[in-house]
Amino acid sequence: MAAAAEAWPELELAERERRRELLLAGPGLEQRVRAAGGRLPPRLFTLPLLHYLEVSGCGSLREPGPGLARGLPGLHSLVLRHNALGPGLSPELGPLPALRVLDLSGNALEALPPGRGLGPAEPPGLPQLRSLNLSGNRLRELPADLARCAPRLQTLNLTGNRLRAFPAALFGPGALPLLSELAAADNCLRELSPDIAHLASLKTLDLSNNELSEIPAELADCPKLKDINFRGNKLRDRRLEKMVSGCQTRSILEYLRAGGRGGRGRGRAEGPDREEARRKKRERRKREGGEGEEAAVDEASRLLLRVLHVSENPAPLTIRVSPEVRDVRPFIVGAVVRGVDLQPGNALKRFLSCQTKLHEDLCEKRTVATIATHDLRAVRGPLLYSARPPQDLKIIPLGRREVKAKDLVRQLQLEAEEHRKQKRRQNLSGLHRYLHLLDGKEQYPCLVDADGDVISFPPITNSEKTKIRKTTCDLFVEVTSAASLQVCKDIMDALILKMAEINKYTLESKEEGSLSDPEADAIPGQASDPRAAPGAQPAGSTPLLVEQVRVVDEEGHLKVVYPSKTDLDLAAAHVTVLR
């Protein structure tokens, strides 16, 4: 027993400090898990205070092991990605009554049958689950009772499996009333049931690179659907196949609604009475999905973004990536956004609150990705994205003096402990909530400017040097992730859209509380910037300018540019992108 306890010092520390977050990673993990029989150590399941547990990148972890559900009843997030779980889960994971996020991506799961799956269906084993990621496995079928096991599911990622069909119960009336995102690209799906119209909250559907030959016309009856991707399917309707490769979602749905070429399936060929009945059905579904949606869409449709390509920019910003980040936090995208107005009233507060909400939701408490925003005037390029040992990384954190990363992390740990003692509770706030994401890391990621100053230390903090202020009108924005490049792009898309919405609201509401004249005089005039949007446009429709930022390797070879032609691919109902 003594030897076993010594083998898992992380568990001793978590128990002693009554931690709510735990990340198992770093050297020696595979050997220790192998010694435990390819399972998580039983002692882990004696930490009932845990809310967040992550064990990732362990090739010897084949099953969680018994006792997880009984020992960790308060778990909110369970991340077991890039391990060797499979072919099933023995025993099944649930019931986990408080679990909201479950990530089992990048494993070797082949099936999730009753008793070796996610949990029981009656009563629901995962009643509060919002996000389920099963991408990058070998699943040939989904559990028939998935909707009953996780009835409040909002996001389902099935990308990169071997699925041939969805279970019929998944699209049953009222089965998943909150499901808004369904991704099942890169599978072997041959058919999409017309019953998908029962997903009243569905907003995003990605079924690219499958074996579909038809798209059901009923898909157009999904009242909130805004973004679809059917690229890479050999559709019988050649015109529709071309449309899914180049047209916006609204055009594709209108084509389906009209019955496709020659009126096949429905539309005018069905007669005016049938079409009128379907129209009323669509309107009823829209009402059930929430009134006011159309008004919100109409409001958002006036949002404008203009993209400035690298070839048009006299001084484009570039990020060079060093090999050291490969095993730490390898993915990064950046963009420059000009024309933001943070001066009036609570505009800056709304912007920072928006960033915090994205960190909580899409970024899953910074475990999936981290956003950093900088005042462009203080950023000197080109930039270097690298990784350094904690004792060698220096930064001036927001609101603090210059400090080594090693000492900063220690300071934050001491502050967290003091916070626990004073508040007599376990939940943490601010930067303290993200310290566990650095556990086991021998090097920390950082973004360095041309002066050699560290301006970003993800996922912990930015530098005081590039802090956003009310006078900030041009921003440099970065998103980093250990998960994937696409995650970075998706979150950047969401952030820029939110920035456009906030900017539009600020301009239209004409809030009071602007800066005093001396502060206002310190702001460079945007009208003189040759890259700024044309001044002839009315204030309410002035577009934000989004400048492309290139990410290159050490030799200068392009890794990614954002936004590319496929980025900011948002429905016209939300935003108009001028390229």
Image (cartoon, helix red, strand yellow):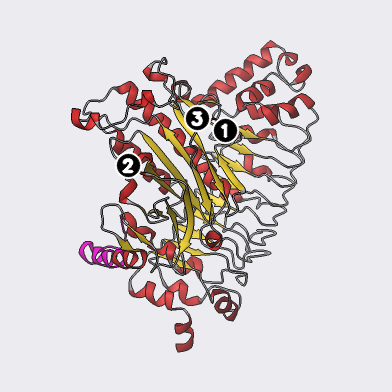
Which one is earlier in the sequence, the residue at label 3 or at label 1? 3
Indicate the secondary structure of the residue bearing disc 2. loop
Sequence-wise, which precedes: disc 3 or disc 2? Answer: 3
Is label 3 or label 2 in front? Answer: 2
Neighbour class for label 2 at 10 Å: few (<14), some, many (≥20)?
Answer: many
Question: Taking 436 as reference, is 140 above or below it?
Answer: above
User: Which of marks 2 and 1 precedes in the sequence?
Assistant: 1
Q: Amino acid at mark 3?
A: Gly
Alpha carbon of mark 3 to alpha carbon of mark 1: how far? Answer: 44 Å
Separation of residues labelled 3 and 2 (CA atoms): 38 Å
User: Does residue 287 belong to the magenta stretch?
Assistant: no
Q: Quadrant of residue 211?
A: top right
Q: Position of residue 550 (x, y in %)?
A: 54, 43
Residue sitting farthest toward the top: 272
Amino acid type shown at disc 1: Ser
Tell me the CA gap for discs 1 and 2.
28 Å
Is residue 62 visible in the rendered structure shown here? yes
Return the mark for residue 289.
3
| x, y percent for residue 368 | 49, 53
Q: Which mark is residue 468?
A: 2
> From the viewer's perspective, is residue 32 above or below residue 253?
below
Q: Which mark is residue 311?
A: 1
Q: Residue at x 42, y 55 (%)?
A: 458
Q: Which residues are magenta?
A: 412-429
Q: Residue at x 72, y 53 (%)?
A: 140
Q: Nearer the viewer, mark 3 or mark 1?
A: 1
Badge 3 local density, few (<14 within 10 Å), some, or many (20+)? Answer: some
Is residue 168 or residue 410 the one in the foreground? 410
